[in-house]
Structure formats: structure tokens, C-alpha cells
């Protein structure tokens, strides 16, 4: 997680009080790929399919850090820095361009006892994936852990009915820096899990990663390493139908602002003990649209290409925005 400015730190505690499920109104403002060239539609290996800035009058909305795009790109399910479930319906025009969002709903996540994860260090949900059996796997940082929630949340089955169970923790993850833990989780087409830490060092220019495998009813994590391009750090991951994985990476400094790399891991290189090598697909640097981008997901599009959706975490900071970007991957 990247937190920019003092406002978001204060908001973390103010807004994280336990709440009830609620439907919320959402407003979408269209975005362009390049602020200096509004007609631009390509960057690197990505083609622009629209983007929106999302706002709501609900003070509980924001901080989206882990996201799934399902139902052919029509449904968004996310978790936030203050342990809210968020779901919404995405809207497209006739050309398949992302233009709007509606049907917003929020609810509080709960712990294994059914107690709301309403505030404090245990509330910082950062990554989300769906297991082959339908359960939702959520990675948390600060108090580093992984929880598996029952299937059904995407249909509105939030709240106390969704008590999770502890899931096996990748070995060594609990040694991660306080707010630089399990930012990226992806379920591969063959059912294996890929987990990547944001900044748990595994050697010069490497961070720790793990490959999760279920065998004979038992689950185990096998170590990997992920090669970074400093100062970029991984923030999200999504599996493609062919077994490749797209990863978002982010860095920030006050002079250049937020910069983001979108990269690909080839499926052949994802194996126990491997060093994961990245292939850059695009680099998002102003005036190209960017923000504190923290999660990515992928799904096939009607035209046969692969769609990518990337969401930005506003940290509940008025100086930042919740944005959702939509691209297609060009081979």
C-alpha cells in the first residue's frame, strides 16, 4: 500500500468504524488515456478501452486495494483498506468502452469469529482472488495473514454470514515490512496460486513470491523470487487464460508523482524455485492517466482479445481519486 499525505492516515481511523451493509450512489467521470492527447488510444502493448473516476457521497467508499472483475466484465467486487466489501455493476457503450458504474454496495468484512474488522491494524485488506472452489481469498498486511471467505459475496451475501477461515500463510510473509506485505494474489488456470510480496527482500533486486499448490487434500506454498525494476514494486496480479500473469508495479516520489509499470510473467517461467522475470507491456507516467494503482484483473472480451481492468486506491485522501482503467492486451 502507498499512502500519500497525512489526510489518508487520519481518515483510516475515522472511516474504519464498523458499519452496516448499504447501497450507495456512485458517480462516474470519463477519463482519457493521455491528458495532452485526448485522441490517443494505445500505450505500449495496451489499447485503451475507457476509464472512469468513481465518486460517492458515502464516507465509507474508497481505499480499493484488491479487485475481481467477473460476469464477463460486468461485475466488480473489491476489498478496501478499511475492510469493506464493495460491489458494483460496470457499464459499457456499444463499442465496449467503459463509460459508467452503478449498483454500488458496501458492507463490513468480518473476522473468523464474526466480529467486524472495523478499524486498526487488522483491517488492512490488500489483495483478492477467487479459489477454484468459489471461495474468496483475501490477503492482509500490517497484521500479515490470509483469510478464505465463503462463496456468495459477489451476490450480496455479505456480513456475518460470510465468516472466513484462516488460510495457510506463505512461509516468511509475516516478516514483511508493516505496510508492504501481500499485495498480489492470483489464481492460475490450473488451480495453483501465485502470491507476490510488495517489498519482502529475497536478494538484490528481488522480492519474495510463492507458488501455492493443493495436493491430496493438503496445501503448501513453494518459494519463488520476483525480479523488480527499482524503484517499482508489485501491487497486483491477474492470471490470463493461457496461464501468463499480468502484474502492476508502482512507485512514487514528490517530483515525478505516481508512476506505474504493467508487466507480464510468462507461464513457462512460473515454477517452484524460479526467479520470475517480467516483460514490460506499458509504463503509465503523466500526462498518461495514472494514480495509486493497486489491483488488476483480466477477462476475455467479445472481440477475442484479453481485457484488463486496473483500479486506483484513493487512500480516503481528497487529493487522490478512485479510478478504474480498462485496456485490451495487444499480442
Image (cartoon, helix red, strand yellow):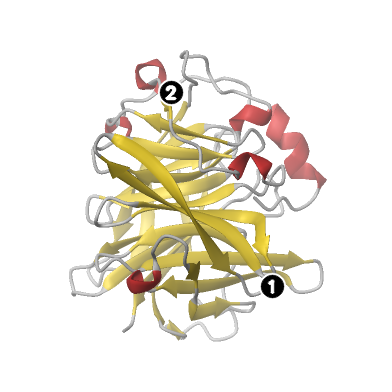
**At 62% across and 50% down in the image, what residue appears?**
314
Give the mark nearest the N terminus, 1 or 2: 2
Residue placed under numbered mark 2 in the picture: 21
Above/below status of 146 relative to 260: above
Viewer-side residue, 29 vs 46: 46
**At 57% across and 61% down in the image, what residue appears?**
234
Mark 1 surroundings: few (<14), some (14-19) or many (≥20) residues within 10 A: few
Kindly identify which numbered label has been placed on residue 230: 1
Viewer-side residue, 246 vs 323: 246
- Residue 251: percent from left, percent from top: 68, 66
- Residue 158: percent from left, percent from top: 37, 25
Cα gap from disc 1 to disc 2, whole angstroms: 41 Å
- Left or right, 53 with reference to 75: right
- Left or right, 31 with reference to 177: left
- Residue 131: percent from left, percent from top: 30, 42
- Left or right, 116 with reference to 11: left
SS at mark 2 in the image = loop
- Residue 165 is drawn in which quadrant? top left
Above/below status of 208 relative to 229: above
SS at mark 1 in the image = loop
Picture quarter with the C terminus: bottom left
Q: Are marks 1 and 2 in contact (CB under 8 Å)?
A: no
- Residue 262: percent from left, percent from top: 50, 72
Mark 2 surroundings: few (<14), some (14-19) or many (≥20) residues within 10 A: some
Above/below status of 279 relative to 118: below
Kindly identify which numbered label has been placed on residue 172: none
**At 72% across and 50% down in the image, what residue appears?**
3
Q: Is residue 11 visible?
A: yes
Amino acid at each position: 500500500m502507498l499512502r500519500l499525505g497525512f489526510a489518508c492516515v487520519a481518515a483510516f481511523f475515522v472511516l474504519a468504524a464498523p458499519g452496516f451493509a448499504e447501497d450507495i450512489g456512485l458517480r462516474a467521470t470519463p477519463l482519457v488515456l493521455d491528458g495532452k492527447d485526448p485522441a490517443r488510444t494505445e500505450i505500449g502493448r495496451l489499447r485503451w478501452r475507457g476509464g472512469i473516476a468513481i465518486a460517492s457521497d458515502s464516507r465509507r467508499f474508497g481505499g480499493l486495494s484488491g479487485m475481481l472483475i467477473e460476469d464477463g466484465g460486468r461485475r466488480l467486487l473489491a476489498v478496501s483498506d478499511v475492510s469493506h466489501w464493495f460491489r458494483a455493476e460496470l457499464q459499457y457503450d456499444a463499442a465496449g468502452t467503459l463509460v459508467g458504474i452503478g449498483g454500488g454496495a458496501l458492507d463490513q468484512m468480518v473476522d473468523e469469529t464474526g466480529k467486524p474488522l472495523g478499524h486498526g491494524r487488522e483491517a488492512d485488506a490488500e489483495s483478492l482472488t477467487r479459489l477454484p472452489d468459489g471461495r474468496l481469498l483475501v490477503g492482509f498486511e500490517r497484521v500479515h495473514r490470509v483469510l478464505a471467505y465463503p462463496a456468495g459475496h459477489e451476490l450480496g451475501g455479505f456480513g456475518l454470514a460470510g465468516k472466513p477461515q484462516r488460510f495457510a500463510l506463505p512461509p516468511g510473509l509475516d516478516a514483511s515490512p508493516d505496510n508492504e506485505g501481500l499485495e498480489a494474489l492470483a489464481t492460475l488456470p490450473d488451480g495453483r496460486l501465485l502470491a507476490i510480496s510488495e517489498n519482502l527482500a529475497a536478494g538484490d533486486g528481488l522480492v519474495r513470491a510463492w507458488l501455492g499448490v493443493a495436493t491430496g487434500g493438503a496445501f503448501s506454498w513453494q518459494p519463488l523470487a520476483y525480479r523488480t525494476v527499482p524503484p517499482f514494486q508489485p501491487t497486483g496480479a491477474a492470471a490470463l487464460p493461457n496461464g501468463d500473469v499480468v502484474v502492476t508495479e508502482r512507485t512514487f516520489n514528490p517530483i515525478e508523482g505516481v508512476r506505474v509499470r504493467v508487466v507480464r510473467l510468462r507461464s513457462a517461467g512460473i515454477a517452484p524455485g524460479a526467479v520470475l522475470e517480467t516483460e514490460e507491456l506499458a509504463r503509465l507516467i503523466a500526462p498518461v492517466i495514472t494514480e495509486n494503482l493497486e489491483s488488476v484483473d483480466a477477462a476475455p472480451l467479445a472481440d477475442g482479445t484479453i481485457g484488463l481492468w486496473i483500479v486506483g486506491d484513493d487512500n480516503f485522501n481528497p487529493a487522490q481519486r478512485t479510478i478504474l482503467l480498462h485496456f485490451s492486451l495487444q499480442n
